[in-house]
Image (cartoon, rainbow, N blue to C red):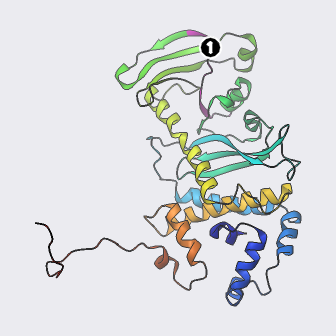
Amino acid sequence: MAFAQLTYRESLRDIEACLRAQQTKLYHLGIRGQVARNTLAHANSVRDWRIYADFAQVLITRARALYADETFGAELAQTVYALDATTIDLCLALFPWAKFRKHKGAVKLHTLLDLRGSIPTVVIVTHGKVHEVNILDQLVFEAGAFYVMDRGYLDFARLYKLHLASAFFITRAKKRFDFQRLYSQPVDRTTGVICDQIVTLVNPVPRKGYPEKLRRIRYFDAEKQQRLVFLTNNFTLPPLVIAQLYRCRWQVELFFKWIKQHLRIKKFYGTSENALKTQIWIAISIYVLVAIVKKELRLEASLYTILQILSVTLFEKTPILQALSLPDCEMQLTTSCKQLILFN
């Protein structure tokens, strides 16, 4: 299944045909018999997907240690996470368990991304009807860390649990947000920060869920010509840093785009829930594994370039560092070149 992710195989029959064509080289991989499509299909439906999830967590722990000192767009010593979800459309006739719309199926990939290295630390796969905010109930919050979320996660009772865990959140306020301003702090409007206020909630239901003070920051994004309103429970960071942290949330969107384009998580080799989750976790393992290779070998190439090279060199008996090291392709012209000069 990892071979299928690395080489963009379309189906189990495709995997079977390609591996059988390399039968003489499979022995060194620990595969002593022929790879059969029925064997892969049976394993996808029977072998528990949690095996691959646990393996991915081992790789994630290793990758996070390697990227602990990586920069992500804001100067901050604490760990910063971006929380978001993406939808993967499915055919309801083939995946009847993946409820989403009346005539449409889908699953959601809820991801908590460590912005240092863009490493996914928590991945939860649900059917499409599960709202994003419910994932906050399944997370164990890290004290002192920042959790950056969009407006879909604005639930004051759940955010208060995050606050009680000594963690910080940064999110956007909805358009209809009733609050009472207690006092305003001085700001430098030349930076794009319009106001920095300490507020409390007015409506009784939200106030019961979050009884303490909040920080409200209005910011004008000059690039997109857009006014943004942020809510956070951190009262010490400068308001411009809060805005920069929210801008870094875009990395989780880039992560979703990357894995959808370069890994096999939009077309699946099986229709059962176990097969789908198995394939997603193996894809995440491949992503993290490529990130580990890039960091440990100190490669300058991007993850995309490394993945493309691996896709055509899996069965080559070449040292991995040699295969992944890109030669200098720039041609240096010498003075002894005998090429005629056409133009002065």
Residue that protrudes farthest toward the left in the picture: 344
142 relative to 309 in the view: left or right: right
Please tell me which residue lies in front, 209 or 291: 291
Q: What element carries label 1?
A: strand
- What residue lies at 54% left-to-right and 16% top-to-bottom? 198
Mark 1, residue position = 200
Which quadrant would residue 39 be assigned to in this image?
Answer: bottom right
- What residue lies at 45% left-to-right and 67% top-to-bottom? 299
62 relative to 197 in the view: left or right: right
Q: Residues within 10 Å of mark 1 (few under 14, many from 20)?
A: many
Please tell me which residue lies in front, 109 or 160: 109
Q: In which quarter of the image is the N terminus?
A: bottom right
Residue 66 versus residue 7 in the image, above or below: above
Q: Position of residue 131 (x, y in %)?
A: 76, 35
Q: Where is residue 293 in the image (x, y as percent from the top left)?
A: 54, 68
Q: What residue type is labelled 1?
A: Thr
- What residue lies at 16% left-to-right and 77% top-to-bottom? 340
For the magenta stretch, what is the residue range? 165-181
Which quadrant would residue 301 be assigned to in this image?
Answer: bottom left
- What residue lies at 82% left-to-right and 60% top-to-bottom? 275
Which quadrant would residue 45 be assigned to in this image?
Answer: bottom right
Please tell me which residue lies in front, 131 or 93: 93
Q: Position of residue 101 (x, y in %)?
A: 82, 37
Residue 312 versus residue 214 in the image, above or below: below
